[in-house]
């Protein structure tokens, strides 16, 4: 059972992450850049010489180890799923360099017995001089830990909800394909969970075959936004937040939809049309 005090006060070590242009290229390839090998917008993210990073690469840099497996937390790790992801960009991430971050726990909210619990984890990516590059926040949903507050009496207010996408037709729509080997490429950016590579593990988790990483689908949302709204200029993305609704299977096509709001920001969602399944929802996109 989740131990509120142990989780709330979890002492994350600072992580220093040195990466190369090769790592930046590999991340871009993992979220579909290079699918058009002659398009300048693709090439500037996958070829050396003036190489640019995709802003959502922030999700794979200086991240903590699998802290929720620490027995002191009491978390039922097997039933943990990624709930939401939110990245705010403060300046473009260099194509190669060293960034550091120390994660911290925010909200811990008990949704009730049998309903799970929600935990927010955030970190700030800074260089060696302390300059801030990105603020990264993720929400994890602990399906097996609902009702923990009955024993400790502690539960925080739930995090602010992201807005649901409109029911009106979208202003823009982008279809991006994935490869049968997309998960095998993306995992090389750091997430080696066998759920995404081992058929036996996937079947034990209830899936017919390995699934695509949620953060790969999230990165593809940035790719779609760059294609549809930014002329492939990722420096224009200031924030991308979304909720994970359902997994994608490698080889499927993902449809991203965008709605412009009165304040100039966008809402978005994503689906797999062939299964009529929403895979990302409650998306928010802010551009410079």
Image (tube, helix red, strand yellow):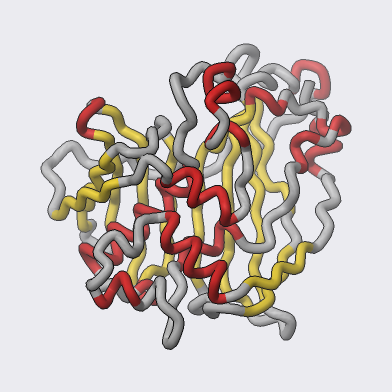
Instruction: Indicate whether 186 appears above or below 95.
Output: above
- Expressed as whole percent of the image width and height from the top left, the position of residue 219 reads 42, 55
**Which corner quadrant holds the C terminus?**
bottom left
Please give the name of the residue rendered at 73% of the width and 52% of the height, measured from the top-left corner: 64
Task: Determine if residue 251 is in view.
Answer: yes
Residue that sits furthest to the right in the current view: 72
Left or right of 194, for residue 42: left
Report which quarter residue 2 is drawn in: top right
Residue situated furthest top in the rendering: 114
The percent coordinates of residue 107 (x first, y second) are: 66, 42
Residue drawn at the location 33% of the way across and 69% of the way down: 287
In the drawing, does residue 176 fall left or right of residue 50? left
Q: What residue sits 42% from the left and 69% below the top?
A: 238
User: Could you tell whether 110 is left or right of 7 in the image?
Assistant: left
Residue 251 falls in which quadrant of the image?
A: top left
State the residue in front, 268 or 153: 268
Between 57 and 283, which is closer to the camera in this rendering?
57
Give the position of the N terminus as an image quadrant: top right
Q: Is residue 162 above or below residue 145?
A: below
Residue 263 lies, in percent from the top left, at 26, 63
Q: Residue 224, position in %: x, y?
A: 28, 57
Q: Residue 49 versus residue 167: which sits nearer the camera? A: 49
266 left or right of 111 in image: left
Say whether residue 157 is visible: no
């Amino acid at each position: 059972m989740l131990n509120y005090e142990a989780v709330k006060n979890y002492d994350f070590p600072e992580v220093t992450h040195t990466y190369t242009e090769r790592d930046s290229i590999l991340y871009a390839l993992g979220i579909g850049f290079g699918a058009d090998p002659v398009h300048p917008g693709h090439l500037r993210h996958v070829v050396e010489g003036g190489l640019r990073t995709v802003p959502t690469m922030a999700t794979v840099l200086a991240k903590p180890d699998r802290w929720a497996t620490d027995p002191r937390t009491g978390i039922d790790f097997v039933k943990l799923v990624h709930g939401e992801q939110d990245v705010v960009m403060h300046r473009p991430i260099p194509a190669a360099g060293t960034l550091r971050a120390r994660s911290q726990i925010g909200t811990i909210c008990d949704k009730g017995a049998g309903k799970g619990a929600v935990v927010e984890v955030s970190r700030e990516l800074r260089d060696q001089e302390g300059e801030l590059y990105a603020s990264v926040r993720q929400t994890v949903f602990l399906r097996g830990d609902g009702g923990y507050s009955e024993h400790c009496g502690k539960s925080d207010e739930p995090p602010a909800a992201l807005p649901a996408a409109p029911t009106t037709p979208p202003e823009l729509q982008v279809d991006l394909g994935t490869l049968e080997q997309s998960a095998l490429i993306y995992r090389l950016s750091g997430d080696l969970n066998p759920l995404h590579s081992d058929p036996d593990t996937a079947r034990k988790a209830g899936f017919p075959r390995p699934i695509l990483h949620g953060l790969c689908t999230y990165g593809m949302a940035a790719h779609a936004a760059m294609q549809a709204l930014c002329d492939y200029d990722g420096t224009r993305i200031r924030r991308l937040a979304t909720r994970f609704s359902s997994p994608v299977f490698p080889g499927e096509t993902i449809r991203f939809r965008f709605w412009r709001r009165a304040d100039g920001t966008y809402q978005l969602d994503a689906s797999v049309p062939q299964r009529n399944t929403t895979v990302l929802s409650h998306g928010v996109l802010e551009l410079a």
